Amino acid sequence: MGVLHEFHDAAYARDWADRFTPSPPREALFATMLGMLERHPLPHPRVLELGVGPAYFAERLLRRRPDVHYEGLDFSRPMLDLAAERLRPFGPRVTLTAGDLLQGDWTSLVQRPVGAIVSTWALHDLGAEAWTAKVYSDCHRLLEGGGILLNGDFVKPEDTTHDYEPGRFTVPRHLELLSAAGFSGRQCLGYWEKELEAPTTAHNYACLLAFKEREGHEGPH
Ligand SMILES: C[S@@+](CC[C@H](N)C(=O)[O-])C[C@H]1O[C@@H](n2cnc3c(N)ncnc32)[C@H](O)[C@@H]1O
């Protein structure tokens, strides 16, 4: 299914979480996403994250936004356990949900209404453009009008001569898929750790933003 990590193994998940402690550029991606969530008034203060992982982003969001109720979806039980540990101080503001973005209608598993959907370094693991396109469409259906989608993920640089996993593709292609899913105001908010010569799997990630129009609203954002 294109998932290259052994996220279902508890020892692997813990080791991965320790190695993935956010570096300054990764913190810059988080700050960009948090800033956008603050600048854009959400139609509802429920924020859904796809791929909660060890909850590094969730912790920062919940600390900064006491008004937000957070739901994190993940298909890895060990990752959900790590997230539960990290997010315990936030008590009833947190819901953690087991679900696979590649199986059935995952949107039926989560609480509504949803004012914002976020994801970091997760959707490339779906393994193909077509899966990301489907998840973008699912998100458009799930979001309230006026809601936003923020996807910070590994991408393929436009000017590369290297091969990349099929789940990693260019920023313009992400923007096309967001458009096809019905989103407006699509843009790239930033690109971090760009590396063309000797890229590793940890280089080249960007933040994509898109809006779901309120019903009856015609103009662009
Ligand atoms: C890099 S981690 C996310 C890190 C997280 N955003 C954070 O800030 O700590 C990616 C997560 O996506 C989850 N994931 C990958 N494929 C998935 C799928 N098909 N359905 C649900 N979760 C998935 C993995 O289990 C993993 O926990």
Image (cartoon, helix red, strand yellow):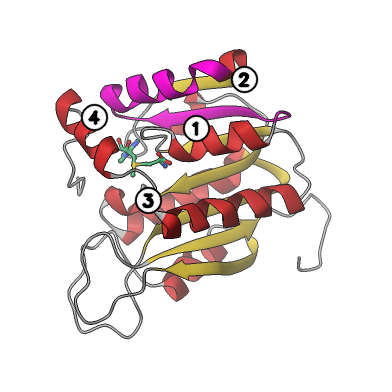
Give whichever of 171, 128 is nearer the camera.
Answer: 171
| Real-space Cα separation, disc 2 to disc 3, in angstroms | 23 Å
Give me the residue at 75% from left, 53% from top: 39
Mark 4 vs mark 1, foreground winner is 4
Query: Looking at the image, in which quadrant does ligand 1 appear?
Result: top left
Instruction: Identify the residue under disc 4.
Output: 14
The type of residue carrying mark 1 is Thr
Q: Are marks 1 and 3 in contact (CB under 8 Å)?
A: no
| Real-space Cα separation, disc 4 to disc 1, in angstroms | 27 Å
The residue most toward the front is 24
Asked whether mark 3 and ligand 1 are closer than 8 Å, the reply comes as yes
- Packing grade of label 3 (10 A; few <14, some 14-19, many >=20) is some
Q: What are the residue bounds of the magenta stretch?
A: 66-89
- Packing grade of label 4 (10 A; few <14, some 14-19, many >=20) is some
User: Which label was assigned to residue 121?
Assistant: 3
The type of residue carrying mark 3 is Trp
Label 1 residue SS: helix
Q: Are marks 3 and 4 in contact (CB under 8 Å)?
A: no
Instruction: Identify the residue under disc 2.
Output: 93
Give whichever of 138, 155 is nearer the camera.
Answer: 155
Relative to residue 136, is residue 69 depicted above or below?
A: above
The type of residue carrying mark 2 is Arg
